[in-house]
Each structure stands twice: as C-alpha cells, then as structure tokens.
Image (cartoon, rainbow, N blue to C red):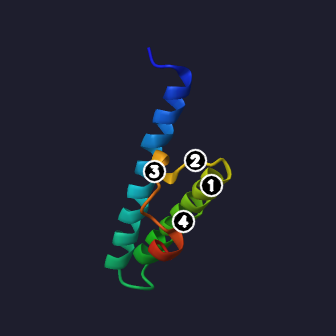
Amino acid sequence: MPRKNDRYKNYLFDIGLFIKEGALKAREKRSKEKKGSKAHMYEAGRVMAFYEVISLLQQEAEGFAIPLKDLQLDGIDPDKDLL
C-alpha cells in the first residue's frame, strides 16, 4: 500500500495534468467559435476559470517551493497561453 504522502503527491501530479489539458482544450474550442457568439463566450468563461485555477496553483507551488514539474503545471504560462 502506498504511503499517505505518496497518495497526495500522485493525486496532485495527476490533477495538474488534467487541469492543464482542460485549459488548453477550452482555449482551442474558444478559438474555433465565432467571436461574440454564445459558444465563444461560454468557452471564454471556461478559459478564464482555468486561468484563475492554474495561476493560483502555480503561485502556491512557488510559495511552498514545489517545482511546477511535480504538479505537471510546467510548460504553461497562464498570462501568455490563456489570455
């Protein structure tokens, strides 16, 4: 049985990737929709939500000296990639 700390580490490792993938998919969907359409506004809202979550997770990781690679949140810059 894995140690308790390993479970949390593995959970955060997996969830980081799911969040990053979701953000990039939402960005892609947003770009395919006509600007001003309901679908575009919906996807834009999803992208902003992912922006907030990823920004917060990255800031907190920095504060706790956790490498972004350990959370699979490396390789994405919310300011450049999501705005």
What is the distance, in whole Å, between disc 2 and disc 4 at their CAs? 19 Å
Cβ atoms at labels 4 and 3 below 8 Å apart: no
Of label 4 and label 3, which has the lower sequence position?
Answer: 4
Residue drawn at (51%, 53%) of the image: 68
Q: Are marks 1 and 2 in contact (CB under 8 Å)?
A: yes
Identify the residue position indicated by label 3 in the image. Answer: 69
- At 53% across and 50% down in the image, what residue appears? 67
Q: Residues within 10 Å of mark 4 (few under 14, many from 20)?
A: many
Among the two numbered marks 2 and 4 on one chain, the one whose residue lies closer to the N terminus: 4
* Location of mark 4 (residue): 51
| Identity, as a three-letter code, of the amino acid under mark 3 | Lys
- How far is disc 3 from disc 2 in space, using C-alphas? 8 Å
Q: Amino acid at mark 2?
A: Ile
Label 3's element? helix
Q: Calculate the distance from the C-alpha at mark 4 to the C-alpha at mark 3.
A: 18 Å
* Distance of label 1 from label 2 (alpha carbons): 6 Å
Name which residue type carries label 4: Tyr
Residue identified by numbered label 1: 62
In the image, taking residue 40 as reference, residue 50 lies left or right, namely right
CB under 8 Å between discs 3 and 1? no
Of the residues shown, which amino acid type is indicated by label 1? Glu
Front of the two marks 2 and 4: 2
